[in-house]
Amino acid sequence: MIIKIVIIVFIVFAIWRTSLRYQKKDITGRELIIWLIFWFLVALAAIWPKKTDVIAQWLGVERGADLLVYISIIVIFFLLFRLIVKLEKIDRAITEIIRDRALKGKSGKI
């Protein structure tokens, strides 16, 4: 029971921080909705953990906790892939900017 309280308190904190980031325009409305849905689903899984077993068995996994771990790993790897792609894109853009500035510097047009 204590873990449920801890999880719910953390969810409230996460929703509060997410809404602050939205107010500061750090995230879009679409991202806010995605995060709110995510935290809502986490709250449901924390409050009624046995319901995840039903969904897991329907998907061919024995326990709901196992399903949540599998989904979490898949999501983490997907987000890691997106992050790596963005970093590589930024790296190429910085390289291009530096190359252009260096070439302009050689011709005396800085």
Image (spheres, grey):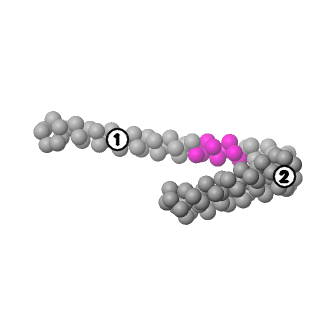
Residue at the left extreme?
108
Assign a secondary structure to mark 1. Answer: helix
Amino acid, disc 1: Ile
Residue at (84, 52) in percent of width and height: 49
Please give the residue where the numbered disc 1 appears in the rendered image. Answer: 94
Q: Which residues are magenta?
A: 71-79
Q: Is residue 93 visible from the viewing direction of this image?
A: yes
* On-image quarter of the C terminus: top left
Asked if residue 19 lies left or right of residue 25, the reply is right
How many residues crowd around disc 2 within 10 Å: few (fewer than 14), some, or many (20 or more)?
some
**Pick the front one: 8 or 32:** 8
Amino acid, disc 2: Pro
Asked if residue 70 lies left or right of residue 94, the reply is right
How many residues crowd around disc 1 within 10 Å: few (fewer than 14), some, or many (20 or more)?
few
Q: Is residue 20 above or below residue 72?
A: below
**Pick the front one: 26 or 34:** 26
Q: At which x and y percent is residue 105?
A: 17, 37
Asked if residue 17 lies left or right of residue 55, the reply is left
- Quarter of image, res 103: top left
**Pick the front one: 73 or 9:** 9
- Quarter of image, res 72: top right
Report if residue 21 lies within the magenta region.
Answer: no
Q: At which x and y percent is residue 23?
A: 53, 62
From mark 1 to mark 2, how far is it between C-alphas? 47 Å
Majority SS type along the magenta span: helix
Assign a secondary structure to mark 2. Answer: helix
Q: At which x and y percent is residue 66?
A: 79, 43
Disc number placed over residue 49 in the picture, else none: 2
